[in-house]
Image: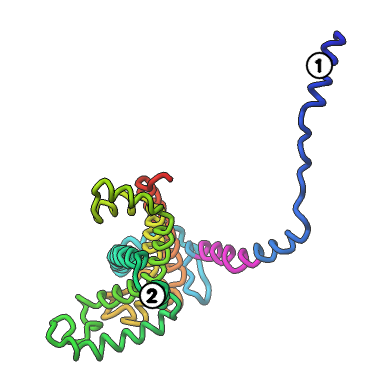
Amino acid sequence: MSTTTRTARATATEAAPIAPKKRLALPTYYWMVWPAVIAFAFFHTVPVLVGLFFSFTNYAGYGSWNFVGFSNYVNLFRDDRVLNAYGFSFWFAILATILTNVLSLAIALGLNAKIVARNFWRGIFFVPYVLAILIVGYVFQYLFSNSLPKILASIPVFRDNILTDPTWAWLPIVLLAVWQSCAFAIIIYLSGLQTIPAELYEAASLDGAGAWKQFTAITFPMIGAYFTINMVLSLKGFLQVFDHVVALTNGGPGTATESVTLLIFRGGFSGGEFAYQTANAVIFFIVITLVSLIQFRVLQRREADF
């Protein structure tokens, strides 16, 4: 090897940057993280795995049990009560999601405008989110069963106690859920609206674009990510509706307003169907996951690129 070649290689070696040594996390980091990991595994992961195990048995929540394979899962698709609960949950969730996002976006647009006492009204609209929904639900129950039949006696739907009407008992649940959920959705939409540059609206106004055109061409596309978040969180939350139903109708009249979560709770903890309803919970988890993934995939296609 020539002297020139050796010199060139030595120069290249000296010029090459020295890779920094990989630093290990401080011991304090592990002392802070591991307790949280252990607590999460103990209170979440282990119960989930135990429940998944018992879903393949005939365990009633007490006494002995035997393996039954996939019988619980097969029987779920033959159970009319389970299918009706899924039908009610999806009908309720879709309707409540649409109403929540339409009203929340409209209110957020109004609060984002230059109105008097804007911060005050923002606080007012957020109040329902911090209230205990079960307690508020009992207040709504009194209103729908006692006050509204007297105030709205001229309206056939509200003339009697609507909570005992199998056809319309879902309506108070939707109204309560939308009233409570709009608070969080409004905050999300307000955060999105504040990211839109005012120059875009000024340029659109100079081009002759009206309010509706500005909303469809600027506002809605620019808050697409926030719309996606609200839609996914709303539908996921409404599919798991529980407190609203318990407070207003307790699943009645009959099983007209029985949600999937209420059915799982009733059958699993007091109906001797622990394993059966655990299998139902597993199916419900898969359904919610698939619905959320489909929502993300569909809605993210229409989000504007910043």
Q: Choose top left, top right, bottom left or bottom right for residue 117.
A: bottom left
Residue under the point 26% across and 74% down: 170
Q: Is residue 277 visible?
A: yes
| Viewer-proximal residue among 40 and 17 | 17
Horizontally, is 228 left or right of 1 in the view?
A: left
Residue 265 included in the magenta stretch of the image: no
Horizontally, is 94 left or right of 20 in the view?
A: left
How far from the left and from the top, in percent, is residue 162? 22, 82
State whether the magenta stretch is mostly helix, strand or loop. helix
Q: Secondary structure at mark 1?
A: helix
Residue under the point 24% across and 78% down: 169
Residue 40 included in the magenta stretch of the image: yes
Q: Work out whether mark 1 precedes mark 2 in sequence or the reverse, and give the earlier one.
A: 1
Tell me the residue that label 2 is attached to.
117
Label 2 crowd (10 A; few <14 / some 14-19 / many >=20):
few
How far from the left and from the top, in percent, is residue 121? 38, 75
Q: Which mark is residue 8?
A: 1
Magenta residues span 39-54
The amino acid beneath tag 2 is Ala
In the rendered image, the vertical position of residue 226 relative to residue 162, given as above or below = above
Q: Quadrant of the C terminus?
A: top left
| Viewer-proximal residue among 168 and 280 | 168
The CA span between labels 1 and 2 is 73 Å
Q: Is residue 87 visible?
A: no
Q: Secondary structure at mark 2?
A: loop
Q: Choose top left, top right, bottom left or bottom right for residue 265.
A: bottom left
